[in-house]
Image (cartoon, rainbow, N blue to C red):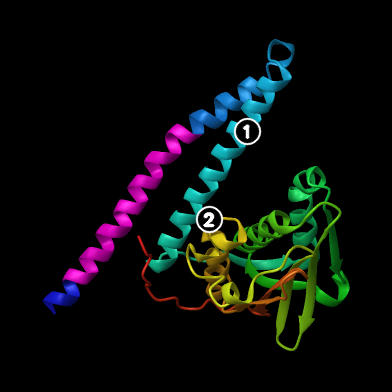
Amino acid sequence: ADRSEALTEAERLKRDFVGNVSYELRTPLTTIIGYSELLQSQGESLSERGKGYAAAVRGAATQLARSIEDVLDIAQIDAGEMVLDNDEVKVGAMLTDAAERWRAQANAGKVEIVIDCDEEAVGYIRGDARRLAQTIDHLIENALRQTPPDGVVTLRGLRAVGEVRLEVADSGRGIPFHVQAHIFDRFVGRDRGGPGLGLALVKSLVELHGGWVALESEPGHGAVFTCHLPETAQPAVIGQTEMGF
């Protein structure tokens, strides 16, 4: 009993530490992002090179802020404290909105985002709209990072027996076979060029909806991430897991 209590207390202290550090990091990041936006808006008073520097600072700070949010979300899931706000979500509209959020970045990289979803056939799914959008965002960001110019990222919505499938496919470099088995592990996913936390969060969010996520990829021939979500999206119980900090 004493050992169990000690472990529980250690888990609580770890979550509190991660939460406190994360919140403390967000305050200066907000200032950095705000001033970089101000510098970008200075117009003729700032050189093109200066604007580029300000944009780089803003982009890096924004990415760091998102990574911190991911850490907090995973800590919340591990603690069993994340509660889904389920509602009827129109799949086609959700994919369209996601594509628009990433259109500018895709255009900058000369990558086309295509939506393949029969809205009438797929219809609605019951789930947390915010968390499902967060899941798709991470998969799109990952796909854009791996797709070269003139490539394509495809968002698909499909309805199968008892489930809805959300797919994000890219025509990028693919994932080495030795990495695929660990692609959803925390921090291992950095082999795909990112911090590795985003794909781990995708897995956790899909499982929280009672579903599962799969990967199909052949090196040199792109990758397809598929979220298998039950039509009714019954929330799963995710136990506390080791965060690895």
Q: How far from the left and from the top, in percent, is residue 29?
A: 48, 35
Name the residue located 74 percent from the left edge and 55 percent from the top edge. Answer: 98
The rendered magenta stretch, by its main secondary structure, is classed as helix
Q: What element carries label 1?
A: helix
Q: How far from the left and from the top, in percent, is residue 236?
A: 50, 78
Q: In the rendered view, would you say 115 is above or below 149?
A: below
Q: In which quarter of the image is the N terminus?
A: bottom left
* Magenta stretch bounds: 6-29
Q: How far from the left and from the top, in percent, is residue 244?
A: 37, 64
Name the residue located 69 percent from the left edge and 68 percent from the top edge. Answer: 88
- Count up the numbered dots: 2
Residue on which the image places disc 1:
56
Amino acid type for the residue under numbered disc 2: Pro
| Residue closer to the observer: 85 or 9 | 9
Question: Does residue 17 appear left or right of residue 202 in this picture?
Answer: left
Quick one: label 1 or label 2, which is nearer the N terminus? 1
Q: Would residue 223 be counted in the magenta stretch?
A: no
Amino acid type for the residue under numbered disc 1: Ala
Badge 2: how crowded within 10 Å, few (<14), some, or many (20+)?
some
Residue on which the image places disc 2:
195
Residue 133 placement: quadrant: bottom right
Name the residue located 63 percent from the left edge and 58 percent from the top edge. Answer: 138
Q: In the rendered view, would you say 63 is above or below 245?
A: above
| Residue closer to the observer: 88 or 35 | 35
Marks 1 and 2 close (CB-CB < 8 Å): no
Q: How far from the left and from the top, in percent, is residue 227?
A: 66, 74
Q: Can you tell which mark lies on residue 29?
A: none
Q: Distance of mark 1 from mark 2, alpha carbons?
A: 18 Å
Name the residue located 83 percent from the left edge and 48 percent from the top edge. Answer: 110
Question: Which residue of the protein is positioned furthest toward the left in this rendering?
Answer: 2
Question: Which residue of the protein is positioned furthest toward the bottom in this rendering?
Answer: 161
